[in-house]
Image (cartoon, rainbow, N blue to C red):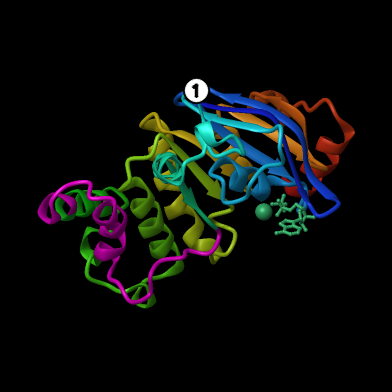
Amino acid sequence: MLELVNLNKSFGDKQVLRGIDLRVPPGQVVSLIGASGSGKSTLLRCVNYLEQPDPGSAVLIDGMQIGGDDPRHGSARQLRQQRSEIGMVFQHFNLFPNMTALDNVCEGPLAHRRGTRAEIREMALHLLDRVGLAERADHYPSQLSGGQQQRVAIARSLAMKPKLMLFDEVTSALDPELVDEVLKVMRELAQGGMTMICVTHEMAFAEDVGDRVIFMADGRILEDGPPSKVIRNPEHDRTRAFLARAL
Ligand code: ADP
Ligand code: MG
């Protein structure tokens, strides 16, 4: 589903990702953990080319290389198409403030002409129902709690029927009592077979929803394995030190 080959990323002379190799099979749920500054967000952003990886890096979705400096796999149209197959949800729910929840969910499929207006509206209502917000379809973001906004953001991503979902600390900015409603939606998505990479500080979530936990340090994958191994019985002192603070 996703393959990263020798992924490097530098900002100026600062190298942030160092030779990341990673294969994620379909349906796998990966929890990405690590200290602030270790490169987790940059990795996610390189996956959908919000950041351009350094030359020599490769990002493949279903075996197709995305973006890149080689014009053979780099047309703008192709990149847009490939990006539309990857959903991303951020810490700060960036909904369009001037659109209702329903219109936020409809916007992507409408822009990409993924059906008639009526079909898209019906699909969007179904998605809002799935995230528990059928009753809030006509509310504007400012009329929704942070947890509700984040669930709309997830529905909005799903509306593009992504093959892969990327979550970057989507519960970090929420009041504690709103975290669970968002994790519940992510848990259901995982159980439904979605391929997901979740950057998270929620170790309980990483442990019981993730098939696999990756610990990053200094732009490298330091540890990679099942939660029972990485969280409960890590190999490296740095993982242990991180977990001692996080658990
Ligand atoms: P994490 O998500 O693990 O906290 P990030 O991927 O956000 O880490 O950042 C990794 C490093 O890259 C940090 O040192 C950060 O300052 C740097 N960085 C991230 N984005 C940029 C950017 N656009 N320009 C310069 N440095 C950046
Ligand atoms: Mg980050």
Q: Residue at x 24, y 63 (%)?
A: 102
Q: Residue at x 45, y 26 (%)?
A: 27
Where in the image, quadrant-wise, is ligand 1 located? Answer: bottom right
- Magenta stretch encompasses residue 133: no
Q: Residue at x 43, y 34 (%)?
A: 190
Answer left or right for 243 relative to 194: right
Q: Is residue 51 shown to the viewer in this render?
A: yes
The image shows residue 67 at horizontal and vertical percentages of 54, 39
In the image, the segment drawn in magenta is: 91-120
Answer left or right for 144 relative to 34: left
The image shows residue 61 at horizontal and vertical percentages of 49, 30
Answer left or right for 155 relative to 65: left
Most foreground residue, 231 or 9: 9
The image shows residue 216 at horizontal and vertical percentages of 75, 38
Q: Quadrant of the C terminus?
A: top right
Label 1 belongs to which residue? 63
Residue at the outermost right position = 237
Q: Residue at x 22, y 70 (%)?
A: 138
